[in-house]
Image (spheres, rainbow, N blue to C red):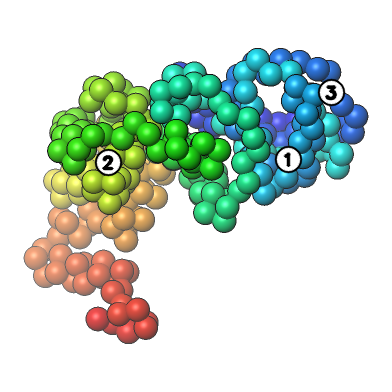
């Protein structure tokens, strides 16, 4: 089938791909078994699916859930379409569904929250987010789909106590503090939890995502190195696990309000200049009382 595929994430347990299908065939494709478990989130066009003889219509307000072993064929009544594809391994599916990899039948209808989460994931991917962040957000989006498809199973498998949740969160924080460049899959193996389970618990305990916490740790290291006069920003980005210098610059500007070069100047200048710089940074993040007034 003609078209373009842009792979944003390719890990052992999860793939994330932006697909622009170029098919102009409006009739049914050949009948074939589904080779993988996948989620197809259509963004433009209409896709007709025939799964084990039962027809479905997939549009931008629904998610097609591909189940391995089913006989399926497709038609494109409006011509080419565009969709996001998430492919998950059987262990990852089992983790999302309470330990059982059997995927229930059904078409998931998209909520406004799910639609926004889908586009936010794509936006992060297009802006060069690394595999840790994309892995966490892909898991969260997949979990949200399963929560619509099988809510009881998706909600199962939580730690039995608050103490267990705190212990898992503390373990993850300790590993990230020692090795902020560790990957999401490796972090999960180290603390004995799947990425999805770890992300869900960590966010519930701390109020922020694993990616956000790791970002704060990396920002602290960037600021320390800049205060020491570090000038090799490309090398610093590689050392701290950013995809490149531009990725680090965007992340630092987003969280600190200024790019690394400007921060280095402020952090290595005289006390008076530093004080002026602090006021400049504060002005970037004006605190309001909810009515547009300074608090």
Q: Please state, as top left, top right, bottom left or bottom right, where the C terminus lies in the image.
A: bottom left
Q: Given contact means CB atoms under 8 Å apart, are the residues at marks 3 and 2 in contact?
A: no
Instruction: Give the residue at x 49% y 21%.
Output: 101
Instruction: Give the residue at x 90% y 29%.
Output: 27
The residue pinned by badge 1 equals 58
Q: Is residue 1 visible?
A: no
Of residue 250 and residue 64, the one placed in the foreground of this image is: 64
The residue pinned by badge 3 equals 29
Secondary structure at numbered mark 3: loop
Neighbours of disc 2 within 10 Å: few (<14), some (14-19), many (20+)? many
Instruction: Give the residue at x 23% y 48%.
Output: 206
Q: CA distance from mark 3 to mark 2?
A: 44 Å
Secondary structure at numbered mark 1: strand
Instruction: Give the residue at x 41% y 28%.
Output: 98
The residue pinned by badge 2 equals 202
Q: Is residue 185 left or right of residue 267?
A: right
Identify the residue at the far left of this view. Answer: 271
- Residue 154 higher or lower than 53, as above or below: below
Residue 65 place in picture, x, y as percent: 63, 31
Residue 289 place in picture, x, y as percent: 30, 80
């Amino acid at each position: 089938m003609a078209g373009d595929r842009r792979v944003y994430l390719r890990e052992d347990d999860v793939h994330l791909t932006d697909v622009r299908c170029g098919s102009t065939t409006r009739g049914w494709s050949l009948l074939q078994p589904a080779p993988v478990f996948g989620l197809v989130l259509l963004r433009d066009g209409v896709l007709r699916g025939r799964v084990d003889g039962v027809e479905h219509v997939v549009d931008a307000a629904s998610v097609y859930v591909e189940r391995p072993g089913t006989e399926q064929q497709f038609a494109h009544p409006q011509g080419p379409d565009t969709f996001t594809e998430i492919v998950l391994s059987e262990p990852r599916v089992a983790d999302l569904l309470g330990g059982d990899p059997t995927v229930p039948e059904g078409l998931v209808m998209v909520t406004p929250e799910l639609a926004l989460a889908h586009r936010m994931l794509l936006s992060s991917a297009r802006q060069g987010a690394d595999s840790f962040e994309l892995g966490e957000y892909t898991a969260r989006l997949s979990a949200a789909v399963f929560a619509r498809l099988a809510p009881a199973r998706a909600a199962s498998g939580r730690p039995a106590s608050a103490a267990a949740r705190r212990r898992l969160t503390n373990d993850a924080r300790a590993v990230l503090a020692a090795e902020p460049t560790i990957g999401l899959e490796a972090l999960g193996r180290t603390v004995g939890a799947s990425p999805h389970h770890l992300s869900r618990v960590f966010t519930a305990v701390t109020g922020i995502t694993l990616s956000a916490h790791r970002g704060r740790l990396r920002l602290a290291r960037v600021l320390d190195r800049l205060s020491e006069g570090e000038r090799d920003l490309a090398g610093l980005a590689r050392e701290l696990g950013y995809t490149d210098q531009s990725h680090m610059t965007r992340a630092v500007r987003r969280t600190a309000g200024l790019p690394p070069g400007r921060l280095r100047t402020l952090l290595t200048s005289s006390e008076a200049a530093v004080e002026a710089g602090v006021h400049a940074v504060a002005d970037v993040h004006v605190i309001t009382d909810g009515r547009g007034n300074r608090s």
